[in-house]
């Protein structure tokens, strides 16, 4: 089995959290 083919739930949480934080920071910068 290829472990890289499917991301674990923990990896998805980290990816999604990083994307959300990046978007929030971008909104905070552009809102000034």
Image: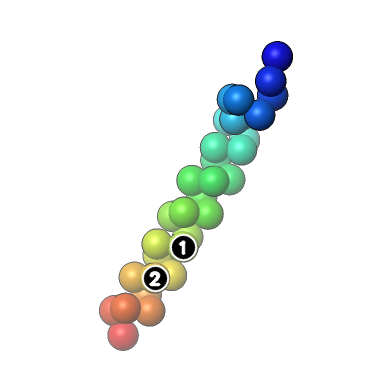
2 sits left or right of 18 in the view = right
Question: In the figure, is residue 6 to the left or right of 28?
Answer: right
Identify the image quadrant of residue 30: bottom left
At 31% from the left and 85% from the top, the residue drawn is 32
Q: Kindly give the residue lying farthest to the top in the view shown.
A: 1
Return the residue at label 2.
26
Query: Disc 2 vs disc 1: Cβ atoms closer than 8 Å?
Result: yes
Please state which of residues 27 and 5 is positioned toward the viewer in this rendering: 5
In the displayed structure, 27 sits above or below 31; it is above
Residue 32 shown left or right of residue 5 in the figure: left
Mark 2 is surrounded, within 10 Å at the Cα level, by few (under 14), some (14 to 19) or many (20 or more) other residues, namely: few
Q: CA distance from mark 2 to mark 1?
A: 6 Å
Q: Residue at x 38, y 79 (%)?
A: 29
- Residue at 69% across, 24% down: 3
Classify 19 as above or below 26. above
Element carrying mark 1: helix
Where, quadrant-wise, is the N terminus in this rendering?
top right
Residue situated furthest left in the rendering: 31
Numbered disc 2: secondary structure:
helix
Residue placed under numbered mark 1 in the picture: 22
Query: Where is residue 31 shown, x and y percent of the image?
Result: 29, 79
């Amino acid at each position: 089995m290829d472990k890289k083919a499917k991301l674990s739930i923990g990896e998805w949480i980290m990816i999604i959290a990083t994307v959300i934080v990046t978007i929030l920071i971008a909104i905070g910068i552009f809102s000034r």
